[in-house]
Image (cartoon, rainbow, N blue to C red):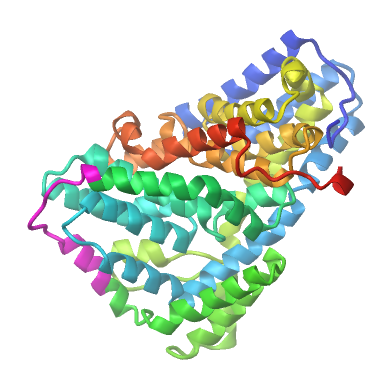
């Protein structure tokens, strides 16, 4: 039934206790002590090993559970390396700086909140990181809103909504690549499939922010002008810088080429484009692909936004992926997840029940543990077999994992994203939560489509 076979089956009370302990370890480590997620994951793995040894499970079986869990992340690891190189090359070529500059160009006093949402979405797609978007231009927009006395809660809601739309739909996003890789779904097919829920959520959110936007006749846009001037001074803003690399990526997507080849082609095309406005020795280009692009404009906000990418920047994410998958492998090996799932298995006979259960699992992991990576990984690992059992393609599970996993994290006050955003924007999570329309609508729409059976992809008879 599961990819990893359980070597024992604990009682339901044991399974609940072990799960509660892991939740406690992760929460106390991240929220109380502010540690990186890697530490509680390692502690949790050690806790499960100790539990297994107490239950007289051979260490070899535990070790196999760890490796069996981590092995599915190898393909994701390679993709993350190529994403890092693509981001670095797109910075070097001016692709991302140009996209951000264009985003600021469309900002006008009319429909202020709606424009903030759109610009943050553009930047989010460009950099593939919601937190980077929030921590850079998000801070600028909060400053503008504060200066002209616009609701900071609404402004933060628009920033978070746009940033997480961009993160969710960007081929550069680690969570998007993780969801597709773990479930062995083509990256661009996954992004295309997410449009069924994401586009309606985007449109509804845009309309809501357009309605809520105050009537402003004069706005001090000094902060935005500083950003734009800083971008121009980099010498990286050129029309061809954004057109060529993006066109290459789109062409490979249309050709349904593997994501790895598309990312590689996008990187090579960006390197070629960079020679049109800068001459760099091969050694520096290669070092940039590994260590990332470094911006030196002297404008702190610009440098923070553009200093990104490189293989090295992916080590943090890769570490989380491998540790979380190892943890998941042990949870399956020790029968924890199978036992918990067996408690509700009788109700997982139909398509709608499987989708609703997986969506609430992703939401629950975010609420209980506050970690979006674990939300995606554990939801994907737990429900793969159930989706196949009811005839659903894994691409549906990838979408649910993001709709109810990735975008829910910033809504949880004690989550990694919630804590970061609240600190950076100086707006409490509970204050912006009612206005983070996109993040609220995504899980609702994915559940509604699951209940109605609309936009779902089924397994071909020969694949079952």
Q: Which residues are magenta?
A: 211-229
- Residue at screen point 19% across, 40% down: 151
Task: Identify which residue is drawn at 58% across, 53% down.
Answer: 174
From the top left corner, tell me how far across and down residue 278 is, in percent: 44, 88
Left/right placement of residue 13 relative to residue 9 reads left
Residue 332 image position (x, y, % from top left): 79, 29
Image position of 10 with respect to 265: above or below: above
Left-right relation of 265 to 447: right
Which residue is rendered at x = 16% and y = 61% of the image? 221
- In this rendering, the answer to whether 452 lies above or below 15 is below
Q: Quadrant of residue 82?
A: bottom right
Residue in the picture at 40% in, 55% down: 121
Task: Tell me where residue 347 sits by quadrant.
Answer: top right
Q: Tell me if residue 226 is in the magenta stretch.
A: yes
Residue 219: x and y in percent read 11, 57
- The reply to whether residue 65 is in sight is yes
């Amino acid at each position: 039934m599961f990819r990893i076979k359980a070597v024992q089956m604990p009682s339901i009370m044991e399974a609940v206790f072990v799960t509660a302990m892991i939740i406690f370890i992760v929460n106390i480590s991240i929220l109380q002590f502010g540690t990186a997620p890697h530490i509680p994951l390692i502690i949790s793995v050690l806790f499960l090993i100790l539990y297994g040894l107490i239950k007289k499970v051979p260490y070899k079986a535990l070790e196999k559970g760890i490796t069996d869990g981590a092995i599915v992340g190898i393909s994701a690891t390679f993709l993350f390396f190529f994403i890092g190189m693509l981001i670095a090359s797109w910075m070097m070529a001016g692709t991302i700086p140009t996209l951000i500059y264009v985003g600021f160009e469309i900002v006008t006093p009319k429909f202020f909140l709606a424009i903030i949402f759109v610009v943050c979405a553009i930047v989010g797609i460009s950099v593939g990181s919601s937190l980077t978007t929030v921590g850079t231009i998000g801070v600028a927009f909060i400053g503008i809103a504060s200066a002209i006395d616009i609701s900071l809660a609404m402004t933060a809601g628009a920033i978070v909504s746009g940033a997480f739309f961009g993160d969710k739909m960007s081929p550069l996003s680690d969570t998007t690549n993780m969801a597709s890789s773990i479930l062995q779904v083509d990256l661009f097919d996954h992004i295309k499939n997410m449009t069924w829920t994401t586009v309606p959520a985007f449109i509804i959110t845009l309309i809501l922010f357009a309605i809520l936007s105050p009537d402003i006749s004069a706005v001090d846009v000094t902060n935005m002008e500083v950003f734009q001037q800083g971008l121009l001074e980099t010498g990286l803003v050129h029309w061809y810088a954004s057109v060529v690399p993006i066109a290459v990526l789109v062409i490979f997507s249309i050709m349904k080429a593997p994501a790895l080849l598309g990312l590689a082609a996008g990187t090579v095309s960006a390197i070629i484009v960079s020679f049109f406005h800068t001459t760099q020795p091969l050694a520096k280009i290669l070092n940039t692909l590994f260590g990332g692009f470094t911006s030196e404009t002297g404008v702190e906000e610009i440098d923070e936004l553009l200093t990104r990418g490189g293989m090295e920047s992916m080590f943090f994410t890769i570490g989380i992926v491998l540790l979380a998958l190892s943890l998941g492998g042990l949870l399956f090996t020790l029968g924890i997840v199978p036992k918990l799932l067996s408690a509700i298995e009788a109700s997982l006979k139909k398509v709608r029940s499987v989708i609703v259960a997986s969506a609430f699992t992703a939401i629950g992991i975010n609420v209980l543990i506050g970690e979006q990576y674990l939300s995606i990984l554990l939801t994907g690992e737990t429900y793969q077999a159930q989706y196949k059992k009811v005839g659903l393609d894994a691409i549906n599970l990838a979408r649910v994992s993001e709709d109810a996993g990735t975008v829910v994290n910033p809504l949880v006050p004690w989550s990694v994203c919630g804590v970061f955003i609240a600190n950076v924007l100086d707006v409490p999570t509970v204050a912006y939560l009612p206005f983070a329309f996109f993040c609220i609508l995504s899980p609702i729409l994915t559940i509604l489509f699951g209940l109605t059976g609309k936009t779902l992809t089924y397994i071909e008879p020969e694949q079952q």
